[in-house]
Image (cartoon, grey):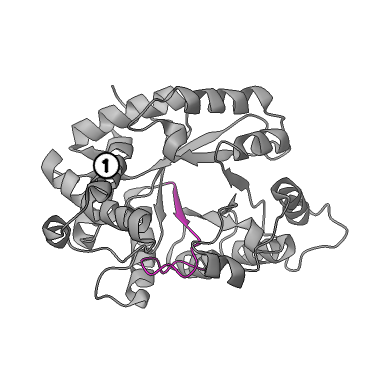
Amino acid sequence: MVINSGIRLSLLDRSRTRAGEAASTALAGTVARATQAERLGYGRFWVAEHHSVPGIAGSAPAVLLAAVAGATTTIRIGSAGVMLPHHQPLVVAEQFATLSAFAPGRVDLGLGRSPGFTAPVRRALRETERDFAADLVELRGFLTGTQEISLHPQPAGPVPMYVLATGRGLPVAADLGLPVIVGGPLLGAGGDPAPGLEALAGYRRAFRPSPQQPHPWVAISLDVLVADTAAEAADLLLPEAWAMARSRTTGEFPPLEPVAAVKAAARTSREQQHLDRTAAAAVAGTPAEVERRLAELLDRTGAAELVASSSTYDRAALTASDTMLAALFRS
Protein backbone atom coordinates (compact mmCIF):
# COMPACT_ATOMS: atom_id res chain seq x y z
CA MET A 1 0.00 0.00 0.00
CA VAL A 2 1.45 3.39 -1.05
CA ILE A 3 0.94 6.72 0.75
CA ASN A 4 -1.40 9.06 -1.12
CA SER A 5 0.67 11.77 -2.80
CA GLY A 6 -1.81 14.43 -1.67
CA ILE A 7 -1.06 13.94 2.04
CA ARG A 8 0.87 16.74 3.71
CA LEU A 9 3.81 15.74 5.89
CA SER A 10 4.86 17.76 8.92
CA LEU A 11 7.05 17.50 12.02
CA LEU A 12 6.24 18.31 15.64
CA ASP A 13 9.32 19.05 17.74
CA ARG A 14 8.86 19.56 21.49
CA SER A 15 12.47 20.64 22.13
CA ARG A 16 13.27 17.47 24.07
CA THR A 17 16.32 17.77 26.27
CA ARG A 18 19.01 15.09 26.47
CA ALA A 19 20.72 13.83 29.62
CA GLY A 20 23.72 16.04 30.37
CA GLU A 21 22.67 18.66 27.82
CA ALA A 22 21.73 22.29 28.39
CA ALA A 23 18.17 23.33 27.59
CA SER A 24 19.56 25.93 25.19
CA THR A 25 21.04 23.10 23.11
CA ALA A 26 17.59 21.54 22.80
CA LEU A 27 16.12 24.84 21.58
CA ALA A 28 18.93 25.28 19.06
CA GLY A 29 18.28 21.70 17.94
CA THR A 30 14.63 22.56 17.27
CA VAL A 31 15.61 25.46 15.01
CA ALA A 32 18.18 23.31 13.20
CA ARG A 33 15.59 20.59 12.70
CA ALA A 34 13.17 23.11 11.21
CA THR A 35 15.72 24.25 8.63
CA GLN A 36 16.45 20.62 7.80
CA ALA A 37 12.72 19.92 7.45
CA GLU A 38 12.41 22.81 5.00
CA ARG A 39 15.27 21.40 2.89
CA LEU A 40 13.66 17.95 2.94
CA GLY A 41 10.34 19.28 1.66
CA TYR A 42 8.19 18.99 4.78
CA GLY A 43 5.05 21.07 4.51
CA ARG A 44 4.88 22.32 8.08
CA PHE A 45 6.91 22.48 11.29
CA TRP A 46 5.11 22.54 14.64
CA VAL A 47 6.33 23.35 18.17
CA ALA A 48 4.47 22.86 21.45
CA GLU A 49 3.87 24.29 24.93
CA HIS A 50 4.94 22.49 28.12
CA HIS A 51 5.61 24.15 31.47
CA SER A 52 8.22 23.14 34.08
CA VAL A 53 8.85 19.71 32.54
CA PRO A 54 12.50 18.68 33.04
CA GLY A 55 12.67 16.83 29.73
CA ILE A 56 11.20 19.58 27.55
CA ALA A 57 12.62 23.03 26.84
CA GLY A 58 9.69 24.16 24.69
CA SER A 59 7.59 26.29 27.03
CA ALA A 60 6.94 29.39 24.89
CA PRO A 61 5.74 28.51 21.37
CA ALA A 62 5.44 32.08 20.09
CA VAL A 63 9.01 32.91 21.15
CA LEU A 64 10.44 29.71 19.71
CA LEU A 65 8.51 30.15 16.46
CA ALA A 66 10.06 33.60 16.04
CA ALA A 67 13.48 31.92 15.96
CA VAL A 68 12.19 29.28 13.55
CA ALA A 69 10.67 31.96 11.32
CA GLY A 70 14.00 33.75 11.15
CA ALA A 71 15.84 30.58 10.12
CA THR A 72 13.38 29.46 7.42
CA THR A 73 11.75 30.99 4.35
CA THR A 74 9.10 28.68 2.87
CA ILE A 75 7.92 26.02 5.33
CA ARG A 76 4.72 26.70 7.27
CA ILE A 77 5.28 27.04 11.01
CA GLY A 78 2.83 26.61 13.84
CA SER A 79 1.97 25.65 17.39
CA ALA A 80 0.65 22.21 18.26
CA GLY A 81 -0.20 23.71 20.42
CA VAL A 82 -0.79 26.72 22.57
CA MET A 83 -2.77 25.65 25.66
CA LEU A 84 -5.50 28.24 25.55
CA PRO A 85 -6.70 27.91 29.18
CA HIS A 86 -3.28 29.25 30.26
CA HIS A 87 -3.66 32.51 28.29
CA GLN A 88 -6.01 35.34 27.48
CA PRO A 89 -7.25 35.06 23.86
CA LEU A 90 -6.20 38.64 23.07
CA VAL A 91 -2.58 37.95 24.10
CA VAL A 92 -2.43 34.78 21.97
CA ALA A 93 -3.89 36.68 19.01
CA GLU A 94 -1.33 39.48 19.40
CA GLN A 95 1.55 37.01 19.60
CA PHE A 96 0.56 35.17 16.43
CA ALA A 97 -0.34 38.33 14.55
CA THR A 98 3.17 39.56 15.35
CA LEU A 99 4.66 36.27 14.18
CA SER A 100 2.77 36.61 10.91
CA ALA A 101 4.55 39.92 10.32
CA PHE A 102 7.86 38.04 10.32
CA ALA A 103 6.56 35.09 8.28
CA PRO A 104 3.58 36.31 6.19
CA GLY A 105 1.29 33.52 5.04
CA ARG A 106 3.24 30.84 6.91
CA VAL A 107 1.88 30.94 10.48
CA ASP A 108 -0.64 28.45 11.89
CA LEU A 109 -2.18 28.44 15.36
CA GLY A 110 -2.91 25.06 16.92
CA LEU A 111 -4.79 25.24 20.23
CA GLY A 112 -5.35 22.75 23.02
CA ARG A 113 -6.56 22.70 26.60
CA SER A 114 -4.28 20.26 28.41
CA PRO A 115 -3.73 21.13 32.09
CA GLY A 116 -0.36 21.82 33.65
CA PHE A 117 1.89 18.81 34.26
CA THR A 118 1.65 18.88 38.08
CA ALA A 119 -0.50 20.58 40.71
CA PRO A 120 2.19 23.21 41.52
CA VAL A 121 2.46 24.04 37.81
CA ARG A 122 -1.31 24.36 37.53
CA ARG A 123 -1.31 26.74 40.48
CA ALA A 124 1.52 28.79 38.96
CA LEU A 125 -0.45 29.05 35.71
CA ARG A 126 -3.49 30.27 37.68
CA GLU A 127 -5.58 27.55 36.08
CA THR A 128 -9.32 27.98 36.46
CA GLU A 129 -12.35 26.54 34.75
CA ARG A 130 -12.60 28.19 31.34
CA ASP A 131 -15.05 27.83 28.46
CA PHE A 132 -12.75 26.49 25.74
CA ALA A 133 -15.30 27.02 22.96
CA ALA A 134 -15.95 30.61 24.02
CA ASP A 135 -12.22 31.32 24.15
CA LEU A 136 -11.80 29.89 20.64
CA VAL A 137 -14.59 32.10 19.34
CA GLU A 138 -13.08 35.18 20.98
CA LEU A 139 -9.60 34.39 19.64
CA ARG A 140 -10.90 33.83 16.13
CA GLY A 141 -12.73 37.13 16.33
CA PHE A 142 -9.49 38.97 17.12
CA LEU A 143 -7.64 37.28 14.25
CA THR A 144 -10.42 37.97 11.74
CA GLY A 145 -11.14 41.53 12.85
CA THR A 146 -14.68 40.93 14.11
CA GLN A 147 -14.14 41.76 17.80
CA GLU A 148 -14.95 45.15 19.31
CA ILE A 149 -11.25 45.97 19.57
CA SER A 150 -8.67 45.45 16.84
CA LEU A 151 -5.26 43.84 16.87
CA HIS A 152 -2.06 45.82 16.57
CA PRO A 153 -0.27 44.65 14.57
CA GLN A 154 -2.90 43.28 12.25
CA PRO A 155 -2.10 39.76 11.00
CA ALA A 156 -0.17 39.75 7.72
CA GLY A 157 -2.72 37.49 6.06
CA PRO A 158 -4.87 34.72 7.57
CA VAL A 159 -3.64 32.83 10.66
CA PRO A 160 -5.51 29.51 10.43
CA MET A 161 -6.62 27.94 13.72
CA TYR A 162 -6.52 24.20 14.49
CA VAL A 163 -7.86 22.30 17.49
CA LEU A 164 -5.78 19.63 19.18
CA ALA A 165 -8.75 17.41 19.74
CA THR A 166 -9.40 14.70 22.24
CA GLY A 167 -12.77 12.99 22.19
CA ARG A 168 -14.30 16.00 23.96
CA GLY A 169 -12.62 18.50 21.66
CA LEU A 170 -13.98 17.06 18.44
CA PRO A 171 -17.58 18.26 18.95
CA VAL A 172 -16.30 21.76 19.80
CA ALA A 173 -14.23 21.86 16.61
CA ALA A 174 -17.13 20.55 14.54
CA ASP A 175 -19.52 23.15 15.92
CA LEU A 176 -17.07 26.01 15.25
CA GLY A 177 -16.02 24.78 11.81
CA LEU A 178 -12.37 24.24 12.73
CA PRO A 179 -9.84 21.65 11.50
CA VAL A 180 -8.50 19.13 14.03
CA ILE A 181 -5.25 17.38 14.89
CA VAL A 182 -5.81 14.06 16.66
CA GLY A 183 -3.50 11.47 18.16
CA GLY A 184 -3.15 8.85 20.86
CA PRO A 185 -6.20 6.73 21.69
CA LEU A 186 -8.31 8.29 18.93
CA LEU A 187 -6.06 6.59 16.37
CA GLY A 188 -6.55 3.16 17.92
CA ALA A 189 -2.82 2.51 17.57
CA GLY A 190 -2.02 -0.74 19.33
CA GLY A 191 -5.66 -1.28 20.25
CA ASP A 192 -9.23 -1.15 18.98
CA PRO A 193 -9.59 1.63 16.36
CA ALA A 194 -13.41 1.55 16.33
CA PRO A 195 -14.12 4.20 19.03
CA GLY A 196 -11.68 6.65 17.47
CA LEU A 197 -13.03 6.12 14.00
CA GLU A 198 -16.57 6.69 15.25
CA ALA A 199 -15.46 9.89 16.98
CA LEU A 200 -13.93 11.13 13.71
CA ALA A 201 -17.07 10.16 11.83
CA GLY A 202 -19.10 12.13 14.37
CA TYR A 203 -16.87 15.17 13.83
CA ARG A 204 -17.40 14.96 10.09
CA ARG A 205 -21.18 14.51 10.41
CA ALA A 206 -21.57 17.41 12.85
CA PHE A 207 -19.17 19.77 11.08
CA ARG A 208 -20.56 23.24 10.43
CA PRO A 209 -18.72 25.08 7.63
CA SER A 210 -16.92 28.28 8.55
CA PRO A 211 -15.25 30.96 6.42
CA GLN A 212 -11.86 29.49 7.33
CA GLN A 213 -12.79 25.85 6.81
CA PRO A 214 -15.66 24.91 4.50
CA HIS A 215 -15.17 21.16 4.99
CA PRO A 216 -14.08 18.91 7.87
CA TRP A 217 -10.32 18.42 7.97
CA VAL A 218 -8.25 15.98 10.02
CA ALA A 219 -4.53 15.62 10.72
CA ILE A 220 -3.16 12.69 12.72
CA SER A 221 -0.18 12.92 15.08
CA LEU A 222 2.00 10.07 16.33
CA ASP A 223 5.59 8.99 16.84
CA VAL A 224 7.15 7.85 13.54
CA LEU A 225 10.74 6.60 13.38
CA VAL A 226 12.44 5.09 10.36
CA ALA A 227 15.75 3.19 10.22
CA ASP A 228 17.55 0.71 8.00
CA THR A 229 16.34 -2.22 10.11
CA ALA A 230 13.30 -2.83 12.31
CA ALA A 231 15.57 -3.48 15.30
CA GLU A 232 17.30 -0.12 14.88
CA ALA A 233 13.96 1.67 14.63
CA ALA A 234 12.70 -0.10 17.77
CA ASP A 235 15.82 1.07 19.60
CA LEU A 236 15.17 4.66 18.52
CA LEU A 237 11.80 4.50 20.25
CA LEU A 238 13.26 3.47 23.59
CA PRO A 239 14.44 6.87 24.96
CA GLU A 240 11.03 8.52 24.53
CA ALA A 241 9.15 5.40 25.64
CA TRP A 242 11.29 5.20 28.77
CA ALA A 243 10.65 8.85 29.61
CA MET A 244 6.92 8.23 29.21
CA ALA A 245 7.10 5.15 31.43
CA ARG A 246 8.94 7.14 34.11
CA SER A 247 6.37 9.93 33.95
CA ARG A 248 3.54 7.43 34.44
CA THR A 249 5.21 5.71 37.39
CA THR A 250 7.30 8.35 39.17
CA GLY A 251 5.53 11.55 38.10
CA GLU A 252 8.71 12.92 36.50
CA PHE A 253 9.25 13.31 32.76
CA PRO A 254 13.05 13.17 32.43
CA PRO A 255 15.43 14.16 29.64
CA LEU A 256 16.08 11.57 26.95
CA GLU A 257 18.74 8.99 27.80
CA PRO A 258 20.96 6.98 25.42
CA VAL A 259 19.54 3.71 24.16
CA ALA A 260 22.24 1.71 25.96
CA ALA A 261 21.35 3.37 29.28
CA VAL A 262 17.66 2.61 28.80
CA LYS A 263 18.38 -1.02 28.00
CA ALA A 264 20.59 -1.35 31.08
CA ALA A 265 18.10 0.30 33.44
CA ALA A 266 16.21 -1.87 35.90
CA ARG A 267 12.47 -1.64 35.31
CA THR A 268 9.34 -2.74 37.06
CA SER A 269 6.59 -4.73 35.40
CA ARG A 270 4.48 -1.57 35.37
CA GLU A 271 7.23 0.38 33.63
CA GLN A 272 7.56 -2.41 31.08
CA GLN A 273 3.83 -2.22 30.40
CA HIS A 274 4.13 1.49 29.68
CA LEU A 275 7.13 0.88 27.42
CA ASP A 276 5.16 -1.70 25.47
CA ARG A 277 2.14 0.60 25.23
CA THR A 278 4.20 3.48 23.85
CA ALA A 279 5.85 1.20 21.30
CA ALA A 280 2.46 -0.14 20.18
CA ALA A 281 1.14 3.39 19.62
CA ALA A 282 4.10 4.38 17.43
CA VAL A 283 5.00 3.54 13.85
CA ALA A 284 8.62 2.39 13.65
CA GLY A 285 10.48 0.20 11.21
CA THR A 286 12.16 0.08 7.84
CA PRO A 287 11.01 2.46 5.10
CA ALA A 288 8.83 -0.26 3.55
CA GLU A 289 7.26 -1.18 6.89
CA VAL A 290 6.57 2.43 7.83
CA GLU A 291 5.11 3.24 4.42
CA ARG A 292 2.68 0.33 4.65
CA ARG A 293 1.54 1.12 8.19
CA LEU A 294 1.17 4.85 7.55
CA ALA A 295 -0.74 4.28 4.32
CA GLU A 296 -3.20 2.04 6.19
CA LEU A 297 -3.59 4.53 9.04
CA LEU A 298 -4.05 7.51 6.74
CA ASP A 299 -6.58 5.60 4.66
CA ARG A 300 -8.50 4.43 7.74
CA THR A 301 -8.73 7.92 9.27
CA GLY A 302 -9.12 9.91 6.05
CA ALA A 303 -6.45 12.29 7.33
CA ALA A 304 -5.06 15.07 5.14
CA GLU A 305 -1.82 15.51 7.09
CA LEU A 306 0.60 13.39 9.08
CA VAL A 307 2.24 15.14 12.03
CA ALA A 308 5.29 13.09 13.00
CA SER A 309 6.03 13.86 16.65
CA SER A 310 9.19 11.76 16.80
CA SER A 311 12.09 12.18 19.19
CA THR A 312 15.11 10.11 20.21
CA TYR A 313 18.39 10.68 22.05
CA ASP A 314 20.68 10.41 19.02
CA ARG A 315 20.24 13.59 16.94
CA ALA A 316 22.03 12.13 13.91
CA ALA A 317 19.71 9.11 13.94
CA LEU A 318 16.71 11.45 14.23
CA THR A 319 17.91 13.41 11.20
CA ALA A 320 18.31 10.17 9.26
CA SER A 321 14.80 9.12 10.26
CA ASP A 322 13.34 12.48 9.17
CA THR A 323 15.16 12.12 5.84
CA MET A 324 13.83 8.61 5.18
CA LEU A 325 10.30 9.61 6.18
CA ALA A 326 10.35 12.59 3.81
CA ALA A 327 11.45 10.28 0.98
CA LEU A 328 8.32 8.13 1.51
CA PHE A 329 6.10 11.12 0.79
CA ARG A 330 8.00 12.06 -2.36
CA SER A 331 7.70 8.60 -3.94
Q: Which residues are magenta?
A: 43-59
For the residue marked with disc 1, what is the amino acid?
Answer: Ala
Residue 284 spot, x, y in % from top left: 24, 40
Locate residue 118 relative to residue 87 in the image: left or right: left
User: In the figure, 152 relative to 203: above or below?
Assistant: below
Horizontal relation, residue 14 to residue 131: left or right: left
**In the rendered image, which residue does mark 1 sit on?**
279
Figure quadrant of residue 115: bottom right
Residue 214 falls inside the magenta stretch: no
Instruction: Name the residue at 34% across, 61% down.
Output: 250
Asked whether the viewer can see residue 271, the reply is yes
Residue appearing at x 72%, y 29% in the figure = 208
Task: Report the predominant secondary structure element of the magenta stretch.
Answer: loop
In which quadrant of the rendered view does residue 192 lie? top left
Q: Residue at x 56, y 36 (%)?
A: 167
- In this orientation, which residue lies closer to the viewer: 264 or 155? 264
Which class describes the residues within 10 Å of circle 1: few (<14), some (14-19), or many (20+)? some
| Lateral position of residue 282 relative to residue 218, left or right | left
Coordinates of residue 277 in the picture (x, y in percent): 30, 41
